Image (cartoon, rainbow, N blue to C red):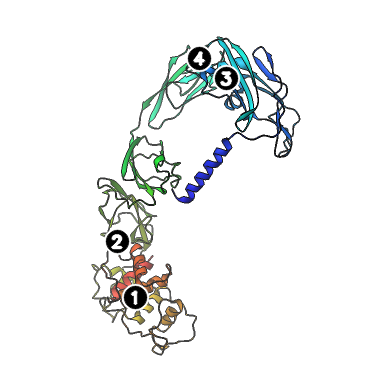
Amino acid sequence: MKKARKLTTLLLAAVLLLACLPMSVGAVSPLPEFKVDGDVVSWDNLFTRTDPYGQERPYGFSEFEISGFEENSSWSFKKEYLANYLEYCDVRWALPNIIDPTTGKTDPYAGHISVNIQDLIEYWSARSDKPYAARAYTITIQCGSDHWNPVAQSTFNYDYQPRSSGVHGVYFGGDHCTATPKLGKPGTLMVVKAENRAGYTFDHWQVDGGSVTLADPNSAETSFKMPSENVTLTPIYQQTGEKHTVTEYYKGSAFKRDYFPGEKVNLMVLESDWDDDFDHWEVISGGITISDAEDGFWAHFTMPDNDVAVLAVFEDDPPFVLPEDVKLSVSFDANGGSGSMETQSVKSGEEFTFPACTFAPPAGKVFDFWSVAGKKNSFFEPGDSMEITADVTVKANWKDAPAEQKKNPFVDVKESDDFYAAVIWAYYADPQITNGMDATHFGPASTVTRGQAVTFLWRAMGCPEPTAKTNPFTDVKETDYFYRAVLWATEKGVTLGTDATHFTPDQTCSTAHILTFLYRTLGIGADGWYAVAETWAKSAGLMDGHAVTVSPETNCPRADVVFFLHRALAK
């Protein structure tokens, strides 16, 4: 886990631990004498403590504890009994005029308390695997604590005799069901409900214990009246779905679990790895979205109707390599078009070849190129290939359909050339990016010059007017076609002169120059020489499917310049 999250988790744990420790208290009055009236034990006044505001205040529900039933000593009556099951145990509070200074309202936890000990024991006897026997129990009642010692407590003996009219419970022979209420005296209306289960359909209730008649045994929600004994019910389900497999790749191992579609799948970092730098859960396949993916303890997703593979990513782990037998999916997004293209299955590590687009284009559009979700500035044409390491979605990108087929004016540019679309785009662009060496020849293999390169870039950016009014270069004249382009390029930091007074417009450019000029023109990131620009160009897909060597020693032909511009700027 990342160190910041790990620190947060440790701090949270410390806060929770402190919250669970018994609290120190201020001045308290002794626990008043209690009165026993049949089964009811009561106190007329509760002992108090001094709160942070200096007021004497009574203790709340969670600070009382009743214990001493030696045969079943693992449970506690603290809070759960006093706060959640009042209707079974006859706990009552009287409210004197004690005002909470933070709200200005009467404090609800003050005054008088009474507990029906008989109902209390019947309640826990109904919940226990070993019912309480008739005998005299020593009962201790305490409130609050001061350094692990009770602030005040009283002990008395209670002669318990089970009664047939006591509290009884509803038990279930399976999960995914609830009872309201959970316990009740004879005659109490009990409502039971079988929850929805992914992959299953509820069929009926099976009575495994107790003499009851269900209102409708075939309904997922039904009712009955509580008899004078405990009741056990089992919900019967019929399997209707098919499970799929979740594969968790975790520190070099693969763990497989099966789930029905719709089930919640929890992803957790093993306790033995809590000290490692967990980063996040990553989706390998399955088309899911992981909630809280960066949390090692609460990450989860809903199981789809297909297999899923996920990876636990730790910061110091070596790069993960999927086994060769893992099947990944390539799906297609029409992106405004219509029709469908079947999802393709590819084994991990295999090359995927981009197909021809068979989507019907939106009105007035034609197919331009494929892009890959999550891969920024990616450009792929049919026939290009890419290695698949996780599920991907391939999106169709569209461009305006030409009013008529644009004629190719150049005899040295053929439709089979990988730069064909780029040359036609540059020739018909508005403003025109470049024409040919003459009316019928583009000169694709001719090396581009510095003057031509900055002109191509300037025109591709819409011929912005330079703000500089002074020309520092003696070899660039106002009548030159590249005059404003040179001023703009040097002003924007695309390139500088070869010295303070010379631009050298006829000097040839290398592939390193061109990619660097383009990188700086688009303002991609921090300036740098061609290695930075080449890395960007590769990640953006500018060089996919196009063989080129990027080097200061490799002359850049005109075809490569327009190819890169087309990939970077064509819409």
In this orientation, which residue lies closer to the viewer: 507 or 70? 70
Residue named by callout 2:
381
Residue named by callout 3:
68
Q: Tag 2: Cα neighbours inside 10 Å, few (<14), some, or many (≥20)?
A: some
Counting residues from the N terminus, which is met first, the one under dot 3 or under dot 2? Answer: 3
Q: For the residue marked with disc 4, what is the amino acid?
A: Pro
Q: How far is mark 4 from mark 1, CA to CA? A: 88 Å
Q: For the residue marked with disc 2, what is the amino acid?
A: Glu
Q: Where is residue 464 in the image (x, y as percent from the top left)?
A: 46, 76
Label 4 element class:
loop
Q: In this view, does 42 lie above or below 481?
A: above
Q: Which is closer to the viewer, label 3 or label 2?
A: 3
Label 2 element class:
loop
Q: How far is mark 3 from mark 4, CA to CA? A: 15 Å
What mark, if any, has residue 131 been given in the picture? Answer: 4
Residue at (42% x, 70% y) in the render = 522
- Which corner quadrant of the image does residue 436 belong to? bottom left
Q: How far is mark 2 from mark 4, CA to CA? A: 76 Å
Q: Position of residue 461 (x, y in %)?
A: 42, 73
What mark, if any, has residue 61 been given in the picture? Answer: none
Q: For the residue marked with disc 1, what is the amino acid?
A: His
Q: Tag 4: Cα neighbours inside 10 Å, few (<14), some, or many (≥20)?
A: some
What mark, if any, has residue 513 been given in the picture? Answer: 1
Q: Can residue 310 be seen in this view?
A: yes
